[in-house]
């Protein structure tokens, strides 16, 4: 269980030391503006209706904009069956007018509170009505895995199925002039949702919406959060003491979490990376075919011819670099599945210990930081960090060199290249 620890700890320490000063290699200006746009959204689109007794009735569009201190614009007005855009300031507001507003979230909230328009997105939810003081408002980013991507709020039935209302949407780089119910949501959209405070964290998890950190939402906090930690510790201890195989121990832990209801079946299904499962299921027979037909030996023969005149440490480094290079095009687990047999066969041809070469494959596949597609963690921070594809090599290239310079000697130290 802890055979990885000596090499992993050394690389972790070296990486942290480098990151303490290496963060300066990132593009500061663009990162700062992206981070600010992510955490403090400047403009939202919301949909309001002028009620019958609103103080806005009889006032003009210019008066409404002035109420928002110039930080609110009216993109569209729907009156009866007519839709008007680019409204002149002298248009007089009437009861029943539906307005699509765009502006600063604080000013929008102040306008709704003072001037009387009602939010169209705030509708009755399914089930028993929740008192207003038990509701809360949260601001979150719609992730790529969210079921809302490509759907409309009406089609997703947010109020009926999930008990939340979509009040406003912000979309970076574009102006929204559509109605909320017919707006097709995209990944990266920032949404303001309102719902029951007790249920909202679970709802956000089900919808794959990432709440902004400044809102202080304790996403995923369980009422029995200590039980999963204990179960995980017991499973790890069983594996470390060789009482159970890895697969049996962690599968039993998963089943136990379901039995004590610390994890719902839906959360368990959502936690499975189905694309990886399909990829591994397709590559396992390919890997076995390559091994059983002599393909592994053939590739290992080519590699051994290329590295036979190199020092053993260089051959180990070459395998690690190969794993780093293959991982972005497959998956870290799939890369190990493909390169593992080749590395083991190459070690045998060179008269070296396979353990060291297999560890080099594992380390190289786990440490691809040159691209945002090498690992899903790299991909997850791309949007919130405001990074571009080319930003990753700035920090990733020196970090990869550190992994090589520290990892190869540590592997050779812990698993001697020449077996007994």
Image: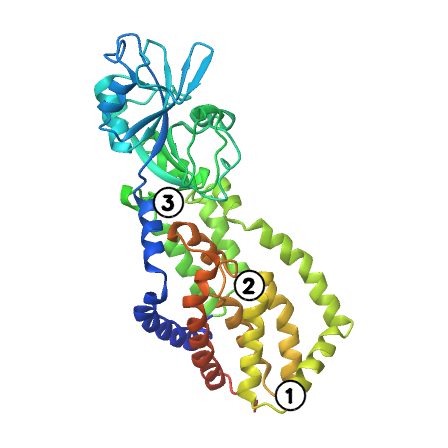
Instruction: Give the labeled residue for mark 1.
Output: 350
Camera-near label (1 vs 3) is 1
Camera-near label (3 vs 2) is 2
Crowd band around label 3 with a 10 angstrom C-alpha radius: few (<14), some (14–19), many (20+): few
Residue 260, visible in the rendered structure: yes
Mark 1–mark 2 distance (CA, rounded to whole Å) = 25 Å
**Quarter of the view holding residue 293:** bottom right
Cβ atoms at labels 3 and 2 below 8 Å apart: no
Instruction: Give the labeled residue for mark 3.
Output: 220
How did the renderer colour the structure? rainbow
**Quarter of the view holding residue 53:** top left
Crowd band around label 1 with a 10 angstrom C-alpha radius: few (<14), some (14–19), many (20+): some
Mark 3–mark 2 distance (CA, rounded to whole Å) = 26 Å
Q: Earlier in the sequence, mark 1 or mark 2?
A: 2
Residue 41: where, in percent of width, then height?
Answer: 32, 40
At numbered mark 3, what does the secondary structure look like: helix, strand or loop? Answer: loop
Q: Earlier in the sequence, mark 1 or mark 3?
A: 3
Mark 1–mark 3 distance (CA, rounded to whole Å) = 50 Å
Residue 106: where, in percent of width, then height?
Answer: 25, 32
Q: 6 or 43: which is nearer to us?
A: 43
208 shown above or below 112:
below
Q: 215 or 68: which is nearer to us?
A: 68
Instruction: Give the labeled residue for mark 2.
Output: 332
In the image, taking residue 259 as reference, residue 131 lies left or right, namely left
Cβ atoms at labels 1 and 3 below 8 Å apart: no
In the image, taking residue 291 as reference, residue 159 lies left or right, namely left
Q: Earlier in the sequence, mark 3 or mark 2?
A: 3
Crowd band around label 2 with a 10 angstrom C-alpha radius: few (<14), some (14–19), many (20+): many
């Amino acid at each position: 269980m802890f055979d990885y620890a000596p090499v992993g700890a050394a690389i972790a320490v070296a990486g942290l030391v480098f990151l303490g000063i290496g963060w300066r290699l990132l593009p500061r200006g663009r990162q700062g503006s992206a981070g600010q746009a992510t955490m403090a959204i400047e403009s939202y689109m919301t949909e309001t209706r002028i009620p019958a007794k609103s103080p806005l009735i009889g006032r003009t569009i210019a008066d409404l904009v002035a109420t928002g201190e110039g930080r609110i614009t009216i993109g569209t007005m729907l009156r009866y069956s007519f839709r008007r855009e680019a409204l002149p300031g002298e248009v007089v507001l009437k009861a029943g007018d539906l307005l699509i507003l765009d502006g600063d979230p604080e000013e929008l909230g102040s306008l709704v509170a003072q001037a009387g328009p009602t939010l169209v997105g705030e509708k009755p939810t399914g089930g028993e009505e929740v008192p207003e003081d038990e509701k809360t408002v949260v601001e979150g980013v719609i992730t790529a895995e969210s079921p809302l991507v490509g759907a409309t709020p009406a089609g997703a039935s947010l109020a009926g199925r999930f008990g939340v209302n979509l009040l406003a949407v912000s979309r970076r780089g574009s102006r929204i002039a559509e109605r909320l119910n017919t707006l097709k949501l995209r990944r990266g959209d920032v949404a303001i949702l309102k719902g029951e405070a007790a249920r909202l964290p679970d709802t956000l998890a089900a919808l794959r919406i990432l709440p902004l950190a400044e809102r202080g939402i304790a996403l995923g906090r369980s009422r029995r959060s200590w039980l999963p930690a204990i179960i995980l510790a017991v499973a790890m201890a069983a594996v470390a003491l060789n009482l159970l195989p890895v697969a049996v121990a962690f599968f039993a832990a998963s089943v136990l979490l379901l039995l004590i209801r610390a994890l719902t079946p839906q959360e368990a299904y959502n936690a499975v990376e189905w694309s990886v499962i399909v990829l591994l299921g397709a590559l396992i027979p390919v890997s076995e075919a390559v091994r059983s037909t002599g393909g592994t030996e053939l590739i290992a023969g080519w590699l051994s011819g290329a590295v036979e005149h190199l020092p053993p440490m260089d051959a180990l480094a070459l395998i690690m670099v190969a794993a780093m290079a293959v991982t972005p095009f497959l998956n870290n687990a799939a890369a190990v599945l493909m390169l593992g047999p080749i590395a083991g066969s190459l070690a045998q041809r060179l008269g070296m210990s396979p353990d060291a070469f297999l560890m080099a494959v594992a380390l190289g596949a786990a440490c691809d930081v040159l691209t945002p597609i090498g690992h899903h963690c790299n991909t997850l921070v791309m949007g919130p960090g405001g990074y571009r594809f080319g930003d990753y090599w700035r920090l990733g290239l020196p970090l990869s060199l550190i992994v090589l310079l520290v990892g190869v000697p540590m592997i050779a130290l812990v698993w001697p290249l020449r077996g007994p």
